[in-house]
Amino acid sequence: MGILKSFFTNCAHPQGRMGRAMLRFMNLCHAPLTNWGLNLIDYQDGWTMLDIGCGGGATLKRLLKRSKDSQVYGIDISEESVAKARKVNAELLDKRVFVRQGSAEELPYEDGKFDLVTAVETVNFWPNLPDCLQEVCRVLKPGGKYAIMVEVVDNDSKWTDLCDGMTAYSPEQLQKLLADAGFVNIEIHRKKPSNAAIIGMKPLCI
């Protein structure tokens, strides 16, 4: 149990050898959830997009394929994650893909920069989630979309026991938090057995 807990605790902040193994695990195991959630978005060419908690960088590659002539930014609190995401996207790094280390609490981007922001299996680890959601809203363009993708778990789930610092939110809780942060037209999408995508829009006029 100790080794298993050490491994899954790297979900929040991958570090060292176990962290690198976790990043490979996430790139593989999050693929079905991510592809399903990203397909719910109506993309346009030339978008500027941000993936918060970009992990191993696979979501960045998937976003690039969905918007021609786009630019994709990734940010992660983990140095290991940033290194992995840069390696996975080396061919287009600093051309169409831009990856840096940082926190969702203080996004290092100007107001109204992004057409789309995504967060795959990461909001459960964000401290001060309401403040983070305000930051997401700030960096979105008016009319821009924010898509959260999660595997739905209960607060008494084995996952919250395995992963230090994890908080489980239901889709309805996330919907309310998005509304409180100023998002509108918030939709909940579900896919069996437990996947959920919560998508909100920054108002056109604020």
Image (cartoon, grey):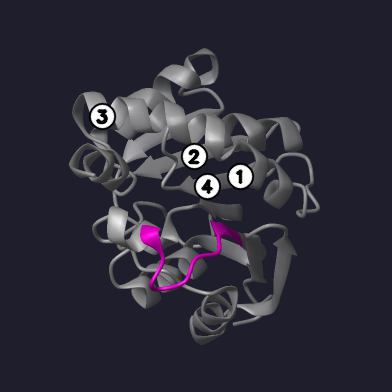
* Among the 4 quarters of the image, the one containing residue 147: bottom right
Residue type of the residue flagged with mark 3: Met
Reading the chain from its start, which is encountered first: label 1 or label 3? 3
Is label 1 in contact with label 4 (beta carbons under 8 Å)? yes
Location of residue 115 with respect to 189 vertically, above or below:
above
Q: Nearer the viewer, mark 4 or mark 3?
A: 3
**Residue at 48% across, 61% down:** 139
Q: Say which residue label 4 marks.
A: 50
Distance from the alpha carbon under mark 3 to that under mark 2: 25 Å
Q: Left or right: where does residue 68 sit relative to residue 90? A: right
Q: CA distance from mark 1 to mark 2?
A: 8 Å
Evaluate if marks 1 and 2 touch, with contact meaning CB atoms under 8 Å apart.
Answer: yes
Point out the tag, 3 or 2, that comes first from the N-terminus: 3
How crowded pointer 3 is (Cα within 10 Å; few <14, some 14-19, many 20+) is rated as some
Give percent across and percent down for residue 5.
Answer: 25, 46
The stretch of residues the image draws in magenta is 147-158
Query: Which disc, if any, is residue 73?
Result: 2
Mark 3 and 2 residues: CB-CB less than 8 Å, in contact? no
| Mark earlier in primary sequence (1, 2) | 1
| Residue with the mark numbered 1 | 48
Numbered mark located on residue 18 in the image? 3
Residue at x 59% of width, y 82% of height: 206
Query: What distance separates the C-alpha of mark 4 from that of mark 2?
Result: 5 Å
Identity of the amino acid at label 4?
Answer: Leu
Q: Amino acid at mark 1?
A: Thr
